Image (cartoon, rainbow, N blue to C red):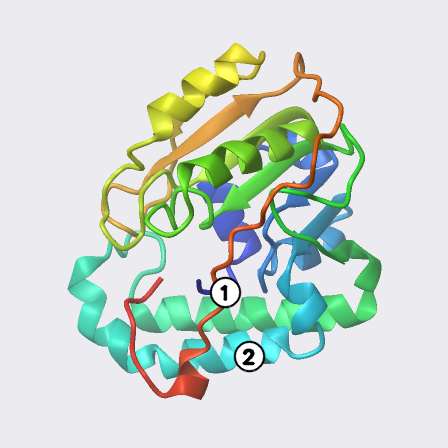
């Protein structure tokens, strides 16, 4: 699993966020070292991030992601033909954006620590309906070859539990194959069975070829059942390749 530092502007494009959307209370899950919550705070937007790495790497996460981004520079240049550059322009532009996001995150988590909470799917540390809109990028579906369908189902229900209105997930592709997550339709049917509607929407953002769609869950009519026994958490440790000194496909 990789941790990145996507920008506020990327979030707006990935999730087709309007000014009206940004007037809601928003959760970013998992937040990683993204600059979204930091920039949201500058704009007076009520946003919170949750990520399991805030328990382990809280003080150094932004710096680790900055170093990871620099470590991947040569690899990104070599792999550039495999990606779509309409948003970032070129590899150098992407690197600048990610480093800026990591630095913004690093400053904000120190200044506003209450906006960055440790937690992980499929059990989040929030009451039901704590947020109007929940955003989730590059975890579910992206790691579909490592995180099983049962985990995906439990995680989607948990995101819906804490959302009063909508959950938006991007992308719906498995990142190391470029194919749409094969269990997507089954999961949507299961969600419909408990009152969670869904739709797939195209967005004005594409980096991985074909990765220009998000899944939107409508949660207003969903009420989570009473908690059962604790659910197992999928284990997929973060790879800090700049520490390992090895390469792996760019995310």
Quarter assignment of residue 60: bottom right
N-term-proximal mark, 2 vs 1: 1
Q: Residue 207, image x and y in percent? A: 31, 52
Residue labelled with disc 2: 64
Q: Residue at x 34, y 73 (%)?
A: 92
Answer above or below: position of 182 versus 59: above
Q: Nearer the viewer, residue 28 or 121?
A: 121
* Residue count near mark 2 (Cα–Cα under 10 Å), binned few <14, some 14–19, many ≥20: some
Q: Point out the residue furthest to the front here.
A: 229
Q: Name the residue located 44 percent from the left edge and 30 percent from the top edge.
A: 215
Placement of the C terminus among the 4 image quadrants = bottom left
Residues at circles 2 and 1 in contact by the CB criterion of under 8 Å: yes
Residue 185's spot in the image, x, y percent? 35, 23
| Quadrant placement of the N terminus | bottom left
Image quadrant in which you'd find residue 171: top left
Locate residue 128 relative to residue 72 in the image: left or right.
right
Indicate the secondary structure of the residue bearing disc 2. helix
Q: In the image, residue 146 lies at what x, y percent? A: 37, 52
- Residue 3 is labelled as 1
Q: Secondary structure at mark 1?
A: loop
Q: Is residue 176 left or right of residue 238?
A: left
Q: Residues within 10 Å of mark 1 (few under 14, many from 20)?
A: many
**Vertical arrangement, residue 79 with respect to residue 40, above or below:** below
């Amino acid at each position: 699993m990789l941790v990145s530092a996507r920008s506020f502007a990327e979030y707006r494009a990935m999730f087709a966020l309007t000014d009206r959307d940004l007037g809601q209370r928003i959760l970013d899950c998992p937040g990683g070292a993204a600059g979204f919550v930091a920039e949201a705070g500058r704009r007076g937007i009520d946003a919170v991030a949750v990520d399991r790495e805030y328990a382990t790497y809280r003080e150094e996460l932004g710096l680790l992601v900055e170093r990871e981004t620099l470590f991947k520079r040569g690899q990104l240049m070599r792999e550039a033909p495999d990606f779509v550059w309409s948003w970032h322009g070129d590899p150098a532009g992407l690197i600048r954006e990610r480093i800026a996001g990591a630095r913004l995150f690093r400053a904000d988590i120190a200044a506003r620590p209450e906006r960055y909470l440790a937690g992980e799917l499929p059990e989040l540390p929030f009451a039901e309906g704590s947020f109007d809109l929940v955003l989730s990028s590059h975890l579910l579906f992206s790691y579909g070859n490592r995180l099983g369908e049962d985990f995906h189902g439990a995680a989607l229900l948990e995101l819906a539990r804490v959302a009063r209105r909508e959950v938006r997930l991007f992308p719906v592709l498995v990142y190391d194959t470029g194919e749409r997550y094969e269990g997507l339709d089954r999961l949507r049917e299961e969600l419909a069975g408990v009152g969670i509607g869904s739709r797939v929407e195209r967005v004005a953002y594409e980096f991985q070829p074909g990765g220009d769609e998000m899944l939107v869950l409508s949660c207003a009519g969903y009420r989570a059942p009473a908690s059962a026994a604790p659910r197992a958490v999928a284990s997929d440790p973060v790879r800090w390749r700049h520490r390992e000194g090895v390469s792996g496909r760019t995310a």
